[in-house]
Amino acid sequence: MVQSGTTIAAAAEQCELAVRTVWGAVKAYRQGGWPAVTVRHGHRPRGAGRALSREQERETQRLIRDHVPDQLKLTYTLWARQAVSELIEVAYEVRLTVRNMGKYLKRWGFTPQRPLKKAYEQTLPPSIGGSTRSIRRSPKPRK
């Protein structure tokens, strides 16, 4: 492009590169041809920067799928982000924030589940202090 008369700024804009990057490429090309122009990819390799290895991730996923937190001596009843974070900290001595744990769970395909809506009417068994009559939810006061 630049050899055919296009300005450095126009070539940089057309290629969506910084002017400085294009200048460096032109300079390298003039000194040694195409072999002298180095191409660097602007992204990290897949999986770089993760706190857990692939094997640790697989093992954690298996534990989540096959067990409940109670079975693994955790103080939770369901798998919440905090529960998984504590599991990883105990198992691998790696501390993850709740936010990062959410990113891992999303990547692994685990989605948050909303609890079922409670019924408007429910009957509590007498063993937990209920009676045989129904408990009704009080209506909202009208204004």
Image (spheres, helix red, strand yellow):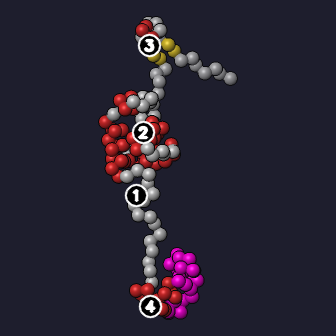
Residue for point 50% across, 13% down? 135
- Foreground residue among 49 and 124: 49
CA distance for labels 1 and 2: 22 Å
Determine contact: label 2, label 4, CB under 8 Å. no
Which comes sooner in the sequence, label 1 or label 4? 4
Give the numbered dot on residue 32.
Answer: 4
Q: Residues within 10 Å of mark 1 (few under 14, many from 20)?
A: few
**Residue that label 2 marks:** 90
Dot 3 falls on a residue whose secondary structure is loop
Which comes sooner in the sequence, label 2 or label 3? 2
Side of 108 relative to 28 (left or right)? left
Give the numbered dot on residue 47.
Answer: 1
Residue 60 visible in image: yes
Which comes sooner in the sequence, label 1 or label 2? 1
Which comes sooner in the sequence, label 1 or label 3? 1
Q: Which residues are magenta?
A: 1-24
Dot 2 falls on a residue whose secondary structure is helix
Under mark 2, the amino acid is Val
Q: Residue 70: x, y in percent?
A: 39, 28
Q: Residues within 10 Å of mark 4 (few under 14, many from 20)?
A: few
Side of 83 relative to 60 (left or right)? right
> What is the magenta segment's predominant secondary structure?
helix
Task: Give the number of the mark in front: 1 or 3.
Answer: 1
- Is 97 situated above or below 9? above
